[in-house]
Image (cartoon, grey):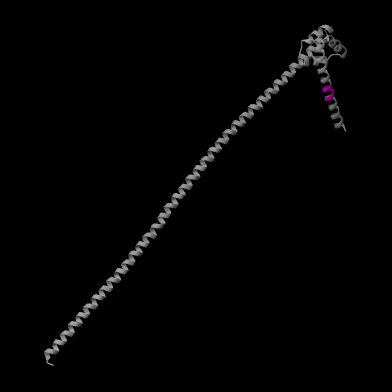
Amino acid sequence: MNKISKLAILLLVLFFAFIGILNAEEKAAEAAAATTETKEAKVEDKTENTKVANRTPIVLTVEAVEELKERERKLEQREKDLDEKEKSLAIQEKIIQHKLRKIEELSQQTGERLEKFKEESEGRVVKLVAMISNMKPAAAAALIENVEPYLAVEILSRIETAKAAKILNLVDKQKSARLGEIYTGFKNSADKKELEQKEKEGGSKG
């Protein structure tokens, strides 16, 4: 071969080598670009995941705060209800205490009036007993007929038995029978009380 043919072959070899180098560099660049894209995609995925991860606790925290607020509201409402019930009970207690004081006052007043009435009644009976004891039987009988039956029996039971019998005989028969019934019951009741009192005294001595 001559020098020109050898040179041509050498140029072809160099040309194909250069093409191979270019292809290799292009593939390397594509591979690097693909690797970069993959890394970027991974970075983006990681970044997105990080954002999601960072965002999730915030959502949960907001829900938790809302739940805490709702619980706080319910507790405040419950406390308010309890305060209102307590106030209502306090008011009712004051009303009951006021009524009890009124009842006690009324009871005391009633007792005082009853005691006063008893004293007045006793004074009236004493006066009537003294008056009838000094009256003639006929006049005493007329007076007995015009007083309340139980008062009449009370008076007759306090004067002498003989005089009481004379007065009772002069009283109207129907009225006299009624007074007799009352007197019998009155006497039995008085005897019973006297007997019970004696038994109590005897028991205490024993």
Residue 189 among magenta residues: yes
Q: Is residue 131 above or below residue 193?
A: above
101 on left or right of 119: left
Q: Is residue 21 above or below residue 200?
A: below
Q: Is residue 192 above or below residue 12?
A: above
Residue in view at x 68 percent, y 25 percent: 107
**Residue 38 coordinates in the image, percent (x, y):** 31, 69
**Residue 74 coordinates in the image, percent (x, y):** 49, 45
75 on left or right of 149: left
Q: Main secondary structure of the magenta part?
A: helix
Where is the N terminus found, in terms of image quarters? bottom left
Q: Quadrant of residue 58?
A: bottom left
Residue 75 among magenta residues: no
Residue in view at x 53 percent, y 37 percent: 84
Q: Quadrant of residue 191?
A: top right
Front in this rendered view, residue 191 or 204: 191
Q: What stretch of residues is rendered in magenta? A: 188-192
